[in-house]
Image (cartoon, grey):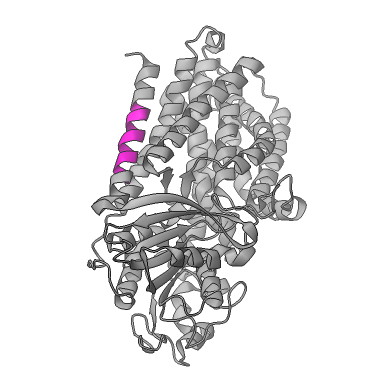
Amino acid sequence: MKGYRRLALVGAVLILAGSLTAHFIQTTGGIRIQDLRFTGTNGTPMSALLYVPLNATAKTPAPGILAVHGYINSRETQDGFAIEFARRGYVVLALDQTGHGYSAPPAFANGFGGPDGLRYLRSLDIVDKDNIGLEGHSMGGWTVLAAAAVYPNDYKAMVLEGSSTGAPFAAEGSPQWPRNLAVVFSKYDEFSPLMWGVPEGRNVTNSPKLGKVFGTDAPVQPGQLYGRFENGTARVLYTPAVTHPMDHISPEAISYSLDWFQRNLRGGTPLPPSNQIWYWKEIGTLLALVGFVVLLLGAFDGLLTLPYFAPLAQVPIAVQDARTWRWWLTLGLTAFVPVLTYFLFFRWGALWLRPSLVFPQGITNQIVVWALLNGVITLALTLAMGRRSRFTTRWLPSVLIAVLTVSVGYVAVVAIDFLFKTDFRFWVVALKRMSLTQFKYFLVYLIPFVTFFIVALRGLHAGLSVKGDTAAKQYLSNLAALGLGFLVFLLLEYVPLFVRGQLLTPSEPLNTIVAIQFLPLLAIVAVIATFTYRRTNSYLPGAIICALFVSWYIVAGQATQAAVS
């Protein structure tokens, strides 16, 4: 079997095997999953996944739970919770907040979509309206709090995961509101100052703000029940030993939610909180994500065999004769300049490129500014160091082969979504199909990302390709150049968090969490860039493939702050 066929087959098998695993886990016990669209406040189109267990019928309504993701996530991020809730006989509405996923922008509008979600859940005849729970992570907590504020008598219990009552986006809590509240706040939560006014997550027990909600002046004791279920004043604090984004993949955090709802909601099919299978879906969608990358490589290799693209196939001509001090300097600058400029350029991006009708996504705008400024630095260093190159540059076939390669991957994502209602993801790294609205501004964001990757990958191959290097050395060199800096950055941030309770830069929790995605994303870029360069002696096809992939990945996964027409 030819190499490209083998790669494409391996990719397809990984995608199918992983997606089937994910599908069977999320539909275990006869659970049905529906991809919903409904109309919210002011005619806002809203999106959600509805998990329907077998016991939920119009004749035998089941308890219902509104489950909501946090900022710059989507409905699928709550899969661990949603799967386990549904296994216990609860109807689950996993909502896309406004401006997230497939719910229409702008983000933050209409109580984040929470009141609309609760109203829709209560409209279903398969839901027992006297037994409804609310669960939300981070900003999703503010979403369910908004629902509780609008409909204070339409739910029975709530779980806040890594979230809080009060400023900046939720109503103040009290011993009476919200009803029957469990707070799951991790010991290493990066947002402890924002959420509960304490510098370290492990000190949340001493938060005056939390004490006010629990009705006590003494430190809140984890696991101790405060108040009474009967009158809605029950409260409990749980403190799993994980970080803010790790709540999604923490069996401990998920078990606390399961226990709380089983203590508050009547009906369903109780199971021990420790009885969990959701992580097999994470494994399945991870396999599918790996398969997606392998499929792209196989598709590219296969397209090179076609007559029109065959002239692109060239033996790479290395630029560097050996690993001199210049080579090591290039490696160091490539790896660490993007990290050293990360926070600064992100701040500039927030100031210079605010969400607008043309560029409607705030964090995507910050990434664009960071990328373009690093592209300028890369170009200046490339010129200053006088790197010669012997690249093959054929623009039209390079663009076409890149578009066709990524199109193969996109068709795979759409097909898996249609067949199994799953995507390609692991934890906070997620590759989803785009809505038509997202596709429009994908085309806009593609322009700066193409510019960046053309400059960056030309500099990468000109500076680090060494004559006589094996494939393994080339892949490792490029992986180090693109990923080592962010690996060191994350270690420098998170080791202090686990040792002394705070990030190295405690004022930058959101951007630090965003940086977690950079590591796997840049590793994928390194693999694609190296693979395509070794087959074409050109940086161009790989640069365009990476720009298409990264633009798609970011735009489909980010929040849209500006209303778009």
Q: Quadrant of residue 265?
A: bottom left
90 vs 198, nearest the viewer? 90
102 in relation to 378, above or below: below
Q: Is residue 481 left or right of residue 18?
A: right
Q: Is residue 326 above or below residue 178?
A: above
Pinpoint residue 7: horizontal percent, then vertical percent: 37, 23
Q: On the rendered structure, is 339 left or right of 228?
A: right
State the residue at coordinates (48%, 93%): 217
Please name the residue shown 69% across and 38% down the image. Answer: 444
**The furthest residue to the bottom:** 217
The N terminus sits in image quarter:
top left
On the image, the x and y values in percent for residue 504 come to 55, 63
Residue 529 or 101: which is nearer the viewer? 101
* Numbered disc total: 0
Q: Which residues are magenta?
A: 10-22
Q: Up-down: is 200 above or below 75? A: below
Task: Report if residue 181 lies within the magenta region.
Answer: no
Q: Residue furthest top?
A: 307
Q: Residue 373: image x %, image y %?
A: 71, 42
Quarter of the rendering containing residue 381: top right
Q: Residue furthest front?
A: 59
- Between residues 326 and 533, which one lies in front from this camera angle? 533
Q: Is residue 187 visible?
A: no
Q: Is residue 531 visible?
A: yes
Depth order, front residue of 381/456: 456
In the rendered structure, the answer to whether residue 208 lies left or right of residue 246 reads: right
Q: Main secondary structure of the magenta part?
A: helix
* Residue located at (43% from left, 74% from top): 158
x and y percent of residue 101 in the render? 54, 50
What residue is shown at x 57% (from left), y 38% (from top)?
A: 552
Residue 16 lies within the magenta run = yes
